[in-house]
Image (cartoon, coloured by chain):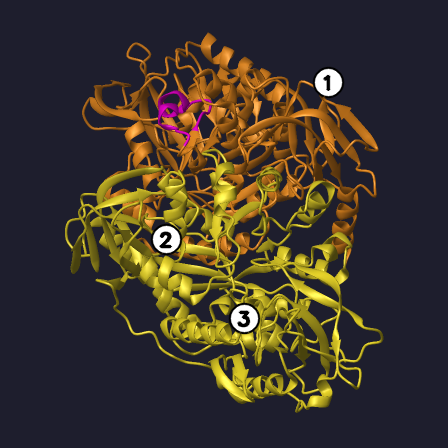
Chain colours: A yellow, B orange
Amino acid sequence: MSQINRIRRLIRVAKGEVQPDLLLENISLVNVFTGEIYPTNVAIAQGTIVGVGKQYIRGKESLNLKGKYLTPGLMDAHMHLESSFLTPQEYARAVIPHGTTAVFIDPHEIANVLGTLGIGYILKASEDIPLNVYLLAPSCVPATHLETSGATITEKDIESLLSQDRVLGLAEVMNFPGVLGQDDMVLKKIMVTRLHGKSIDGHCPGLKGPNLNAYIVSGINSDHETIDRDEAQEKLRLGMWLMIREGSAAKNLKELLPIVTPENHWCCIWATDDLEAKDILTDGHINGILRKAVEQGLDPIRAIRMATINVARRFGLKYTGAVAPGYRADLAVFGDLKEFKTLVVIKDGKIVYEDGEIKVPIKKWVDPKVLNTIKVKPVETEHLKLRISGDRAKVIGLVPQQIVTESLIRKVKKDAQGCVLSDIEQDILKIAVVERHHATGNIGLGLVKGLGLKRGALASSVAHDSHNIMAVGENDQDMIAAIREIERLQGGLVVANHGRAMASLPLPVAGLISPESAETVSQTMDKVLGTARSQGVIAENPFFALSFLTPTCHS
Amino acid sequence: MSQINRIRRLIRVAKGEVQPDLLLENISLVNVFTGEIYPTNVAIAQGTIVGVGKQYIRGKESLNLKGKYLTPGLMDAHMHLESSFLTPQEYARAVIPHGTTAVFIDPHEIANVLGTLGIGYILKASEDIPLNVYLLAPSCVPATHLETSGATITEKDIESLLSQDRVLGLAEVMNFPGVLGQDDMVLKKIMVTRLHGKSIDGHCPGLKGPNLNAYIVSGINSDHETIDRDEAQEKLRLGMWLMIREGSAAKNLKELLPIVTPENHWCCIWATDDLEAKDILTDGHINGILRKAVEQGLDPIRAIRMATINVARRFGLKYTGAVAPGYRADLAVFGDLKEFKTLVVIKDGKIVYEDGEIKVPIKKWVDPKVLNTIKVKPVETEHLKLRISGDRAKVIGLVPQQIVTESLIRKVKKDAQGCVLSDIEQDILKIAVVERHHATGNIGLGLVKGLGLKRGALASSVAHDSHNIMAVGENDQDMIAAIREIERLQGGLVVANHGRAMASLPLPVAGLISPESAETVSQTMDKVLGTARSQGVIAENPFFALSFLTPTCHS
């Protein structure tokens, strides 16, 4: 058995009979078990940490890292790849330079478009890249009965996903009313995960008291939606792993850090949830969170535990998340434990990042099956006619910097035929949701206030959770132009004016993801947002705002 | 699916729509997650903790526990049932009154006699008793190639055992030279356990440096044989779970406690390894360890974690080891966190101990297949003739209170035919090991110094690791009488004099275990030891000393 021979060889290296592949010398080791930092050497062979101690002094290759800090590779305990618009490979290329070696993803968005096919693509695309991509099976696809999503993930699908090694459990059970109401489908998905002995992630903003107990009693034992300290304290006391989220939009670190104590930090872990490519490039990934946490007074060893061994334990991973014999040699070297500037990253025993450069090839590959997913019945101006009786209508009011919206009633502008028109004086714009999975021609119409758009239109194929096409505009022609451009690109974010596309970020992978690098995505996004602003948009990220409006497209 | 209905009901109880089966009111809860103690109520239904909080105020049954402390049920992370001479049921009856609700046993001794049949009996006998008996599959049966044991546990047997829910991994890999020497059989057993995702317990007294790294790199990540602080510190740093042992013979708590810190106590757990019935009755079980630890300055919450959540995490058990919704309702109530006097014990939601009494029936059942295991070819005086050339011979020297022995050379007493005789002047006694598994008639003979026996003989069917019959005596006739009594009892400890048995503790279950209660075993043992002392024995427990002499019985 080759695995036996592998262990045999590791033992010989540890005993000093065979040279390790790589020796890290004079490193200041951050020991997550004992909470100590001390100078030592680390011997690595066959992708595994083989020996830790001053007695290891030779290696086929060696790195003298005097004055530098060695930690386990950092882990992001909960995130959606789709929020970065990056493929697994490009995400890896973006986060490896920040010391990240593992991410725990919920492929909820691509699953809503493509179901298990989309999840299969993520699994395949993340094979053999220098980043451990672990998946949690999406629990809520479609998100609600009201939505026309592209696919459904059934309990059977979950069961089949759970049989795969890299699928570690059930992803955030957003449908907490379903749990509380003992919805059969939700409970079946929970039960099948429990029977597999795997983990169940939660999502229960604001849940308290008996309802929180009821949610947890089902077996769900983490939450990343906590925004206040009392809530955090109650969840910790009731045995939840507290995932402290610090992403592009939702930033909870500052508020929650004071409740992290030496006694409870073993139940706390970091997560980004939704992080944009631009933010990774400018502020880093989990190392950026460590920097903020330490700046705000958290002991750096505890902060590192929350990004390593605690995450591994939460997901039941053995032999990963620490620097010890037998552990996977996924490691990060930092210049200090304050700025957390990453100097070297080691993945499966190989140096994958050093001197500011990624040292290994990362293949670009996209499954052709996840392209060309936008299926739209041609939209004509008559489809966008919004007729109402009377002169007052419901308007969705955006709240700056927040996902929640207000429900307003406003007097609206109408044309001679009685159809509602966008009204830039009041900043009330027509919004359309165009079904795009099955070309049904279903279109939902409404009004939104707060974007600031004065000219042209915006459209996007990213709209939680079903990812139909959202379009908003000052006039119908530009809305149609923007929708057509989305169809032509087979997904993306588009700004239109004068009947044509002025700027766009193509997202051809399931209409959600770009095949380009983080740098290209970030620059293109800047251009698109600049164009939108030049047409009057005041919302900081109008596409983000649109993506959370979640109207449905039943006609 | 009935499990879905169960969860459905738990949710309804947690929400307050249905009354819990049991309500614990005004308890001071020891929260192992947050390290806090605070007053609250705990609602229990269907064997599960359903809700924790002041909002739970009703229950079909309720207990007001004001001023008392509620902890998760205590766990013994590593122990050999056989050392208590008790069956699983009688062991449960002995330890439940001390707040223990789970033990992690290595059935190494019974496996040496009966192989998987013996392990199967332990599994069956521990079903439906108010104690979680988890097993680790014995890794070293037989213990060495030199021994004539009753059975062999192969890699295939291990694999079949690991497929059972209550078998959590591979038991202490005592054969550390085998690991270091990359012995094929040992590595196969380790590998099959790793492939099952289960835990591998270690046993590596004194191992350090490269050899310790080599032992750990194989995947073994706990140790309970550590006796000094430097060793403990090195093992913790290298990622081992440190099992601090405090048993009847080996007591390591006092020495090791100073290395337990707030930062590393998450990697430390308690174990008894070998604990006699008498010690359970007089000093308690894990609660006795907590008492000592707190007396020596350990924070009580940390001490409790080392007996609960840490143990659960070490073995990958979810939903056990804490007081939180969804957790198994295995709980202990203590009067204080100093003496740890146990007031109430709850197992699977039922009160199993209260007011000094066990409240539930515990069935007595012994599989007839594990009885009548002593198969001896009749021993006659000529079989005990020990002929040597010259007048000096090797003598095993006992070291008081220790398992290790000295190898001595002494001038010995011989009869007219040149056969060595026991010599009570020098306290040198003849010792015989009689093969008892296959009635081969194989007998090994030797000499031992230090027992003090002046008259008669002792014999025992407990002799690590193969459990052949050990007999020692002042004369051959009494040795034969003692051996015959062992055969008649089908196992036990015997003191003989004047050609007949004077006192005995029958151990008919595999020749290792009594079917009687802890009280009876303890009292009988006292009587046997008293009789031995009346015949001159000075060793505190001569049977214990004999059991570790481990000579072999190849003729």
Is disc 2 surrounded by few (<14), some (14 to 19) or many (20+) residues within 10 Å?
many
**Picture coordinates of residue B541 (x, y %)?**
44, 18
Quick check: B274 above or below B191?
Answer: above
Please tell me whether mark 3 or mark 1 is closer to you in this view: 3
Label 3, residues with CA under 10 Å away: few <14, some 14-19, many ≥20 = many
Q: Name which quarter of the figure residue B233 lies in.
A: top left
Question: Where is residue B477 shown, x and y percent of the image?
Answer: 44, 20
Q: Which residue lies furthest to the front in this view?
A: A425
Q: Is residue B256 magenta?
A: yes
- Sequence-wise first label, 3 or 2: 2
| Residue B355: image tag | 1
Q: Mark 3 highlights which residue?
A: A537
Q: Which image quadrant is residue B285 in?
A: top right
Foreground pick, A498 / B451: A498
Write down the chain letter for disc 3: A
- Which percent across, then down, holds residue A6? 31, 61
Nearest the camera: B357 or A22?
A22
Residue located at (83% from left, 42% from top)? B18
Q: Mark 1 lies on which chain?
A: B
Taking B203 as reference, is A387 left or right?
right
Q: Position of residue B210 (x, y in %)?
A: 23, 45
Using residue A484 as the reference point, say whether residue B386 is left or right of it: left
Gap between marks 2 and 1, in whole Å?
A: 55 Å
Provide the residue designation for mark 2.
A287
Whether residue A349 is in magenta: the answer is no
